[in-house]
Image (tube, coloured by chain):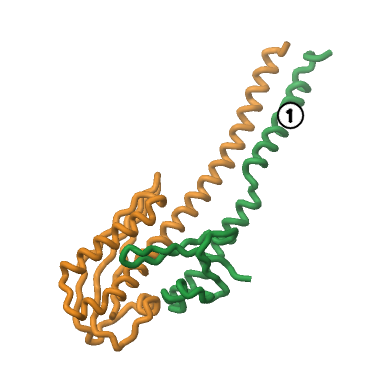
Chain colours: A green, B orange
């Protein structure tokens, strides 16, 4: 009879809570997508730093739309996969660029 | 009706699930904090390169005999501009120390800074100094110090 076997009822409650909780968590955090985003960003940052500190990146590369070293490109508008910001300012004129992997 | 033991077990299960979720949240917060630190580090370098770019652009005026007062005003305006641009990234403090403008006589330049501004050895003025960058965002405090050594 229902309620006479507490352990089985508790197990059922556990399963239900775990399932609902898991679904809610998966819905709110798409972990794989989140991690892919972090990895992509880190790869882009590493490539950009490599280009920057090897002296291959000069300021004019940003304004003239030239591709950066290591297959990176610069965009003036943020889009998917282009979250790395770099700015240049001069006498009140400020421009933010978005760096992403090309191809 | 639930028995007392069922209620106790249900509470324990809920606590376990909450603990699992909070530990996952903790990892996400850690990852985001690391990501923020990397962003601030990149902005610090960005500020340093932007200063070099501005000094390069001001170069002709310095050669025309602009005094330190003019340079200080320009630096103050540049700092205000950068702070405004990065206002969403946290609290930012900037300071340029010991800035000196001299005739260029082959003093050692920073190769990376020179490459970024597209400078060469035929330049007339040598600018040296220290840029201090302090970011403060929630529980993250970052202090960076850059030596500026460029010929413009």
Which residue lies at the image location 17% right of the left edge and 74% below the top edge?
Answer: B66
Q: Position of residue B115 (x, y in %)?
A: 39, 79
Residue A57 relative to residue B108: left or right:
right
From this viewpoint, which residue is outermost toward the bottom? Answer: B122
Which quarter of the rendered picture does the C terminus of chain A lie within?
bottom right
Nearer to me, B122 or A11? B122
- Name the residue that disc number 1 marks: A16
Residue B24 in the image: above or below residue A48:
above
Residue A12 in the image: state x and y as whole percent: 76, 26
The answer to whether residue A43 is left or right of residue B104 is: right
In the picture, the quarter occupied by the N terminus of chain A is top right
Q: Residue at x 43, y 76 (%)?
A: A60
Residue B117, given in percent of the width and then of the height, sits at 37, 77
As drawn, B113 above or below A18: below
Q: Work out which residue is located at the far top of the displayed protein and give it.
A: B1
Q: Going by the picture, which residue comes out furthest to the right?
A: A1
Q: Secondary structure at mark 1?
A: helix
| Rendered location of residue A39, percent (x, y) | 58, 59
Q: Chain of mark 1?
A: A
In the figure, A52 relative to A33: above or below?
below
* Residue B119, quarter of the rendered image: bottom left
At 47% across and 61% down in the image, what residue appears?
A: A85
Closer-to-camera residue (B77/A84): B77
Residue A63 occupies quadrant: bottom left
What is the quadrant of residue A92 in the picture?
bottom left
């Amino acid at each position: 009879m229902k309620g006479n076997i507490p352990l089985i009822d508790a197990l059922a409650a556990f399963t239900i809570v775990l399932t609902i909780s898991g679904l809610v968590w998966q819905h709110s955090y798409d972990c794989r997508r989140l991690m892919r985003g972090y990895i992509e960003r880190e790869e882009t940052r590493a490539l950009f730093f490599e280009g920057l500190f090897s002296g291959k990146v000069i300021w004019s590369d940003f304004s003239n739309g030239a591709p950066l070293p290591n297959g990176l490109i610069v965009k003036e508008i943020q889009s998917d996969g282009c979250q790395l910001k770099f700015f240049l300012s001069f006498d009140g004129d400020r421009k933010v660029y978005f760096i992403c992997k090309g191809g | 009706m639930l028995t007392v033991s069922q209620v106790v077990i249900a509470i324990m299960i809920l606590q376990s699930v909450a603990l699992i979720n909070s530990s996952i949240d903790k990892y996400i917060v850690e990852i985001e904090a690391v990501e923020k630190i990397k962003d601030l580090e990149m902005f610090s370098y960005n500020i340093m390169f932007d200063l070099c770019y501005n000094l390069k652009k001001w170069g002709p005026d310095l050669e025309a005999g602009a005094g330190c007062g003019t340079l200080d005003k320009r630096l103050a305006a540049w700092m205000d501009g950068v702070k405004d641009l990065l206002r969403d990234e946290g609290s930012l403090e900037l300071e340029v120390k010991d800035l000196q403008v001299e005739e260029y006589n082959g003093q050692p330049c920073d190769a990376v800074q020179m490459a970024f501004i597209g400078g060469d050895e035929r330049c007339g003025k040598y600018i040296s100094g220290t840029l201090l960058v302090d970011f403060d965002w929630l529980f993250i405090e970052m202090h960076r110090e850059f030596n500026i050594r460029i010929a413009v």
